[in-house]
Amino acid sequence: MLLHISISSPSRCVLPLASSSYSQILSLGFRRPPPLVSRPYRAPKFSIVCSISQVHNYGTVDYERRPVLKWSALYRRISLMEDPSLGSSGVLDQWEEEGRKLSKWDLCRVVKELRKFRRFKLALEVYEWMIDHGDRFKLNSSDAAIQLDLISKVHGISSAEDYFSGLPEALKDKRTYGSLLNAYVQAKMKEKAEAVIEEMWKGGYMTEVLPYNVMMTLYMNTKEQEKVLSMIAEMKENGIPLDIYSYNIWITSYGAMGDVEKMEEVVQQMTEDSRITANWTTYSTLASMYIKHGHFEKAEKCLRDVELRITGRDRTPFNYLLSLYSNIGEKDEVYRIWNYYKSSFPSIPNMGYHSMISSLARLGDIEGAEAVYEEWLSVRSSYDPRICNILMGWYIKEGLLKKAEDFFDHMRETGVRPNPNTWEILAEGYVREKQISKALSCMKEAASIKRFQVWQPRPANVAALLVLCEEQADTVSMDMMVDVLRKAGCLDIEAYRSLVGTDVRPAMAVDGLNLGLEGNESDGDGENEMLLKQHHASL
C-alpha cells in the first residue's frame, strides 16, 4: 500500500491543458518540486557487516550509483527463463559456470528489480542462493528485512514469523521489526501489528515516522479513522516530524470521515510546513477524496495539478490519472492522458495497459477496452494475465459467461498463463449460473498454482459458493471448498472462519458478491489501496 518518488531527471512533463484559475484551497501555495522453494526456512548465519551504503531515512539501500550492465543482463535471464523449474538458483549457477563472478551488489540490484515487478518467489530464491554460499556474502539487517518481506509474500505470515523468531537478536532492529510490522499490516492482522509496535517502543525504534505511517495505513483500512488522528497527535507530542506520506494519510483519513473542511485545513497546514514539498501523490489523494464526496470540479483541478507535477520518466502518475479521470466519467480525458502517455515514452509497460483497459471497462467502453487489449497483444513484452482478467471480470459482471469462457480459451491459446485470480473470476461466473462443480474446479485450479505469492479467494466469492452448496444440499462440494481454504491457509483468518460455520447465509448478506472490474487483483479498495501501494514503494 507505500509512496512512489521519482529520482530521475528533474525535467517537468506538462500535459496540454487549458489554463484555469485555482480556488484558494486548491492553489494552496504548494511549492513546485525541485528543477519458491518449498524447503523449511532456517535463520541464516549473518555477519553484522554493512557492505552497501545506507541512505534515506528508512534504512533503504542505494543501488543506483553503480554501472547498470551486468545486473540488468542477469535480471533478464532470471525473469525470462523458459524453464521456471530451474529457479533463480539454477540461473545463478549457470552464470558463474560461464566464468562471471557475482557480487552482492549485482544480486541485490536484481532482487530490487524482481520485487519491483512482483516476482517475489524469484527474488527470494536469489537470497537463498546467497545464503547457501556461506560467508562469501555478508548479509545485514537490511537484507534480513527484505527476506522477511519476501517470505511473507511467498510462503505466508506464519513462515515470516518463524524466520523472524530465528534471527539473531543483533539483527532484530528497526528494519526487521519494521518489515514484520509491514507484513502484518498487509495481511490486516491488527492485533499482531499493534504488538509489534509495542516491541518497537520497548526497543527504542519508534523515533522515526515510518512505523507510524504503516500503522495509520492499517487503521485506515480497518476504518478506524480516530486512531489515525490519535497517532498524528502522538507524533506531534513526541516531536516526530510528519512527512509527505503522513500528511497524505491524514488528508485521506478526514476525507474518509466525510469531513472535507477538516481535510482542507490539513492541506493548509501542510503548505505552511517548510519541510514539505507537495508532490503528485498529494494531489491524487485529494482528487480521490473529492471524487468520493462528489466534488468533481475540485477533483478535476487537483488532477490538473497532478499533471503539472509529473517529472522525469515517472510513469506512475499516468496510471493514477487514467483511473481517477475514469472515476468521474471523463472518457475524453482518459483518452487524452493515454495518448499523451504513449507519446511520452518509447513503449508502455503492462501496468500502463492494465490501467487504460480497466479505466475503459469502468466507463463501460468495452469496445475501446477490447481495442486496447488487441494493441497490447501486438506489442507486449511479456504475458500478463492481470490484463486479461479485467475483460473477463467485465464479461462475468455483465452475465456473458460464454464470452468469458471463449476469451479464457483465447488467452491460453495466445500464451497467457492464467493466474489464480483468472480461475476465481471464472468461478464467479459459474456460481452465478449455479454450476457448483465447475466453480469448485476453478477454485481448485486457483489454489494449485504455486508460482505466485499466496492466493486467497475473496470472502464474498467463497460465501456465494457455500450458499449455493447449502441451497442445493451439496455437502460434499461444501467440504471440498473448505479443504481448498484450508490448503490456502485461509482458515487462520477470521473472515474465512466465519464462513465455514453453520450460519453461512448472513455472511453472504453482509459481504455481497463482488465482481470487480479490476480482475480481483487488489486486496484493498479506492484511496486506501492507492496509499498502501504508494507507501509500500518507499520501504
Image (cartoon, grey):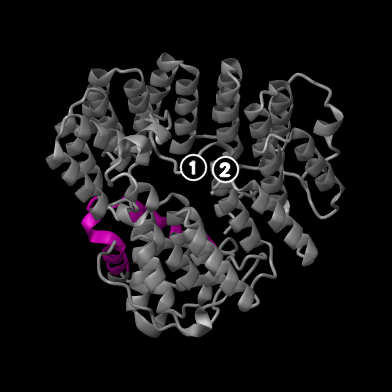
Q: Is residue 394 visible?
A: yes
Please tell me the numbered disc located at residue 323: none
Question: Which residue type carries mark 1?
Answer: Gly
Front residue of this view, candidates 268 and 229: 229
> Horizontally, is 425 left or right of 138 in the view?
left
Which residue bears the numbered disc 2? 528
The residue indicated by pointer 1 is 524
Q: Main secondary structure of the magenta part?
A: helix
Mark 1 Cα-neighbour bin, 10 Å: few <14, some 14–19, many ≥20? some
As for residue 479 lying within the magenta part, the answer is no
Q: Hey, which quadrant is residue 411 in on the image? A: top left
Against 43, is 500 above or below? Answer: above
Can residue 70 be spotted in the picture? no
Q: Residue at x 63, y 73 (%)?
A: 201
Asked if the residues shown at circle 1 and circle 2 are in contact, with their CB atoms under 8 angstroms apart, the answer is yes
Closest to the observer: 78 or 327? 327
In the rendered view of the protein, which quadrant contains the C terminus? Answer: bottom right
Q: Amino acid at mark 2?
A: Asn
Give how far across and how far down residue 432 sits, in percent.
27, 24
For label 2, the SS is helix
**Label 1, label 2: how many angstroms apart (C-alpha)?**
7 Å
Q: Which residues are magenta?
A: 67-95
Q: Nearer the viewer, residue 353 or 516?
A: 516
Residue 74 within the segment the image draws in magenta: yes
- Percent position of residue 42, x then y: 33, 77
- Outermost residue, front side: 502
* Residue depicted at 44% across the width and 41% down the height: 522
